[in-house]
Each structure stands twice: as structure tokens, then as C-alpha cells.
Image (cartoon, rainbow, N blue to C red):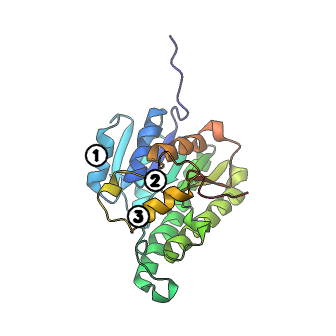
Amino acid sequence: MSVVPGLLEEKVVIVAGLGGIGNGLARRYADEGARLVVGDLDEGTVSRAVAELDPVRVLGTSLDGADEDSVISIVRLAVEKFGRLDGIHVNFTNAADAYLPGGVVDLPLEAFDEVMRVNTRGFVICAKHAIPPMIEAGGGSIVFTASIDAYNGAGTRVSYAMSKAAELALMRHIARKYGPKGIRANAIAPGLIWHYKFDEQWMPEGIVEQTRARQMIKSRFGNPDDVAALGALLLSDDGSFITAQTISVDGGVTFRP
């Protein structure tokens, strides 16, 4: 009996940023046959994620996505261990102003600077160092985890929303500039994706009820598997004619042409 290969069979993929959504990405990409290098600031999170997967095909490492040396290290590890790089999903984020009630007038600039350092500078660093080995391998795919906050116009979280909009601009630049060299770039914009971290942290009053009211799909919230399913397509050859797109995974909260 023949075995049907996965979407990512033998592709070498980096997952930069684990945790709630990231662990789901790693599981799905591994199930689809990818050889993975996964990284996160929290070494315990890395260890737990790798423990669930095949240690021969999945490597874990410490990663500070906003530190250039750290990003260079994870890219080098992927190439040295598996011989090439076919894709990267940049999934880390900083939300220092996510639960601050004020707008830009009340925004602490240290929170703004930290969000931009991680969510904007960090994504630039990952693209800068992942693109060359993917070109050398004959092409590849970059996926960013953005957010519907990039175009929602919320009255709070201005730093976070600005950083996510910047990620979309970077994604489109990559698709335009490096598309002729075989590089595709896309972004996933999740809405409320429920994962284990929500059981560990405080949520602003009313946010869950408000989100459910705005969703067209009322039966449940999104989960990491929903994001991972789309990510697997975008990283795969089945998604080879999709580039420069932002696709929402939000149960119908947003309507965009």
C-alpha cells in the first residue's frame, strides 16, 4: 500500500516563534513531512514542542527573533543540518501595549519601541537572512503571522497594529522584489485564536463576547490548527501560485476584497 506524501514532504522549514500558535504550526508541518528547525526565546517551550515530534526530523534551538546573530544562527543550523532552506514561518510577536486602555496620546514610548523592535525589526532580520539560502535552493516561501489588527482600526493597541501593518508592507516588498528569483511571500492574519496561553493570562473584560458577536462562525473560536492548515498550504508546492496575499483566519470577522 503506497503512502501519500504530505504537503511539505522533505521540505526544510524554520518555525520562528513557538507557543500558542507556533506549537500548532510545528505539529502540522512535521505531520506534513517537513524537516523542521523551531526556535523560541523560552527554552522550555522549545523543549516541550520538540518532545512531541520526531527528534530525527525536528531540531529545537533558542531564538531571539529581534537579534541578528540569533537569526543567523537558526538559518545556519537549518542549512547545515538539512542541506537547504525551503521556507520560514515567522510567528513571534510582542504585544507590550495589547492590554493598555489608552490611545496614542497615553502610549508609553518604551512599549512602542519594544513592539517595533520585535515585530518590525525582527521580521526584517528574518527575511534578510532567510531569503539568500532559499534563492540558492531554487526558491522558497515566507509566511508571516500578522493580525487582523493591521487593518481593523481599533481604538487601542496602536503599536501592535502599526507593527502588523508594517509586516504586510514587508511581505509585499519581498513578493515583488524576490518573486523573479523564486521567492513567494504571504501573511496570515488571525483573529482570536484560542490556545493554552489564554488559560494562563488575563483577558480584557468583554473581549471574548465581543469577538464571538462579530464572527460569522459562532460555534467556536479559531485554534492553532486553523492557522497551521493555511500555513502548510502557503509553504507547499500546492500554494506555488499564491504570493503577496494576506489571508484572514478569523471566522468571518473581517470583510476584505
Q: Which mark is residue 193?
A: 2
Residue found at x 33% / y 60%: 41
Tag 2: Cα neighbours inside 10 Å, few (<14), some, or many (≥20)? Answer: some
Q: CA distance from mark 1 to mark 3?
A: 24 Å
Q: Considering the numbered disc 3 on the image, is that residue within a helix, a strand or a loop?
A: helix
Q: Which residue is mark 1?
A: 48
**Amino acid type, mark 1:** Arg
Q: Height in image: 236 above or below 111?
A: above
Q: Is residue 180 left or right of residue 46?
A: right
State which quadrant residue 128 falls in: bottom right
x and y, in percent, of residue 197 in the image: 34, 56
**Amino acid type, mark 2:** Ile
Q: Earlier in the sequence, mark 2 or mark 3?
A: 3
Q: Earlier in the sequence, mark 2 or mark 1?
A: 1
Q: Considering the numbered disc 2 on the image, is that residue within a helix, a strand or a loop?
A: loop
Tag 1: Cα neighbours inside 10 Å, few (<14), some, or many (≥20)? Answer: few
Residue found at x 34% / y 51%: 196
